[in-house]
């Protein structure tokens, strides 16, 4: 019996105890540090971000290994666990004691290493540093629709003006010769004196995401984890610059989406680079546009109409990307493929092109709807002749075959559509009244319980993004752009 007895050698025992103690000490230390503002700040600036930066740099040495690291750790743990069961079960196994001691070293190392990286990453959700984004004088203020409209007009004017200032190629994309990645890093470092947690090294190599890649949720343009950054490079340069800046904010611990959007906005508008400024204004306008559309659709529709023509007439690529166009990949289980036009009056110079396209889509099985009722081409022609502001919705029963058949059309003529969507009508969508949307977007943060409120709602991604509007309103309130009492 003694011959087959498993014996833990001193080396294995040392590693087991060391990593167990290390994990407990660091876990307790992080919890305590984040409980106190000054200690939490010190920890974030001097421990968390430098360690996170080290791992991002280390994972860059082997392209793609970072995002697979978690999987490698899980499989290593599972294999080690199976080996442990085997050596405990088969007492006559050759080399049993050696395998046993190796497993006892591997399991705590893998668990501690991945858990500590995850712990450093997950503390981002709770750090006290993020409330540096919030303005003490206005954090609890509840804004009104008039404030949102004033901000909307300001941002729309900036986008309209700046969109005309760039040289463009034949596809309508902005001609820009600088490195987008270096520009994003430089913009963040530029504001790091005010937001010190943005100091330090940044990852410079990113995994290229496939457009619409189901691995990243289908619609994501960027993804950041504890092990690396992935970016969809198929977008326009303005959208790409904003996306990279946004994801780099995540690497510094700005994990909530509303704060990452605001972080990239601050970096952009404080940059001396014109594309950076334009990208920031475009992203801010998009968020405010969504909010005004939910609160007052007709008012948003009339105000945004001049912007539509930049996409239709000139095919300004970044303007065409403001609204979702899911044209790159079939979305599994999406039962409906839907094309939505701009207001018909905007096609004055493209009537023949629009009619030919609608006729072709109709022949391919698409149903035309106007104001919720099915329509035919004669009615469409009459509306175009009368300069109608009505919008046409073309609906297909979606499938991979239908999507593949329409793929070329979607990409070739995407500038002629406001949106191209794939969705499941059976999914429940929370419908709010305009008054409910007012509070949803514009209500104040609870200053006494700010972090708890945001932690509790973080898992609601749509809600998290909606809070960008609050941050923008506070920023422009400070600049006296919004209506305010003297």
Image (tube, rainbow, N blue to C red):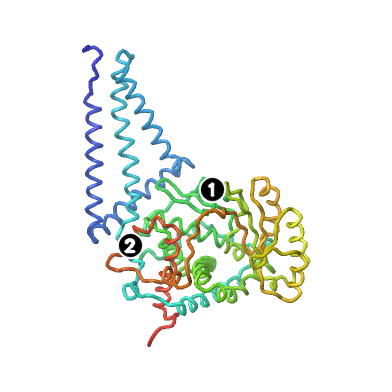
* Left or right for 443, reference 173: left
x and y percentages locating residue 286 in the rendered image: 52, 67
Task: Look at the picture and state if 354 lies above or below 435.
Answer: above
x and y percentages locating residue 481 in the rendered image: 45, 80
Residue labelled with disc 2: 453
Residue labelled with disc 1: 208
At 41% from the left and 33% from the top, the residue drawn is 75
At 60% from the left and 66% from the top, the residue drawn is 319
Task: Look at the picture and state if 411 lies above or below 138.
Answer: above
Q: Secondary structure at mark 1?
A: strand
Quadrant where the image shows the C terminus: bottom left
* Left or right for 50, reference 243: left
At 45% from the left and 78% from the top, the residue drawn is 147
At 59% from the left and 73% from the top, the residue drawn is 301
Q: Identify which residue, 200 or 391, lies in the foreground.
A: 391
Q: Secondary structure at mark 2?
A: helix
Q: Identify which residue, 207 or 255, lies in the foreground.
A: 255
Disc 1: CA contacts within 10 A as few (<14), some (14-19) or many (>=20): some
The part of the image, by quadrant, that contains residue 142 is bottom left
The part of the image, by quadrant, that contains residue 377 is bottom right
* Distance Cα–Cα, label 2 vs label 1: 34 Å
x and y percentages locating residue 211 in the rendered image: 58, 50
Disc 2: CA contacts within 10 A as few (<14), some (14-19) or many (>=20): few
x and y percentages locating residue 66 in the rendered image: 44, 43
């Amino acid at each position: 019996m003694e011959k087959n007895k498993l014996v833990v050698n001193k080396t294995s025992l040392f590693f087991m105890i060391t990593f167990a103690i290390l994990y407990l000490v660091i876990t307790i230390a992080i919890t305590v540090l984040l409980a106190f503002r000054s200690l939490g700040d010190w920890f974030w600036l001097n421990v968390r971000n430098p360690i996170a930066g080290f791992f991002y740099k280390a994972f860059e040495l082997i392209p793609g290994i970072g995002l697979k690291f978690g999987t490698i750790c899980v499989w290593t743990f599972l294999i080690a666990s199976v080996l442990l069961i085997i050596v405990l079960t088969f007492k006559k196994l050759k080399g049993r004691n050696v395998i046993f001691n190796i497993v006892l070293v591997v399991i705590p190392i893998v668990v501690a290493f991945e858990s500590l990286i995850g712990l450093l990453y997950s503390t981002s959700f709770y750090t006290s540093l993020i409330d540096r984004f919030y303005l003490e004088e206005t954090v609890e203020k509840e804004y009104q629709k008039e404030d949102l409209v004033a901000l909307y007009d300001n941002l729309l004017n900036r986008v309209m003006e700046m969109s005309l200032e760039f040289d463009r190629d034949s596809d309508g994309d902005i001609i820009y010769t600088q490195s987008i990645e270096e520009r994003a890093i430089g913009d963040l470092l530029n504001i790091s004196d005010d937001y010190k947690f943005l100091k330090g090294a940044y990852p410079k190599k990113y995994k290229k995401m496939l457009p619409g890649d189901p691995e990243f949720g289908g619609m994501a343009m960027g993804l950041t984890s504890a092990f690396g950054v992935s970016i969809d490079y198929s977008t326009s340069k303005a959208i790409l610059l904003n996306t990279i800046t946004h994801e780099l904010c995540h690497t510094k611990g700005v994990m909530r989406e509303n704060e990452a959007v605001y972080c990239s906005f601050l970096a952009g508008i404080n940059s001396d680079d014109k594309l950076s400024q334009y990208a920031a204004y475009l992203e801010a306008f998009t968020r405010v546009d969504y909010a005004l559309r939910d609160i007052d659709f007709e008012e948003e529709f009339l105000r945004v109409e001049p912007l539509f023509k930049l996409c239709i007439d000139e095919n300004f690529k970044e303007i065409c990307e403001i609204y979702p166009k899911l044209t790159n990949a079939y979305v599994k289980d999406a039962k409906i493929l839907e094309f939505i036009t701009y207001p018909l009056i905007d096609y004055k110079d493209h009537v023949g092109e629009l009619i030919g396209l609608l006729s072709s889509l109709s022949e391919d099985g698409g149903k035309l709807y106007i104001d919720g009722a099915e329509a035919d081409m004669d009615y469409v022609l009459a509306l175009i002749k009368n300069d109608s502001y009505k919008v046409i919705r073309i609906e297909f029963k979606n499938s991979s075959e239908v999507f593949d058949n329409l793929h070329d059309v979607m990409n070739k003529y995407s500038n002629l559509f406001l949106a191209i969507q794939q969705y499941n009508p059976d999914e429940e969508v929370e419908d709010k009244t305009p008054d409910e949307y007012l509070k949803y977007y514009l209500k104040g943060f609870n200053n006494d319980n700010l972090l708890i409120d945001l932690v509790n709602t973080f898992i609601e991604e749509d809600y998290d993004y909606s809070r960008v509007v609050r941050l923008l309103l506070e920023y422009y309130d400070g600049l006296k752009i919004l209506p305010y009492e003297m």
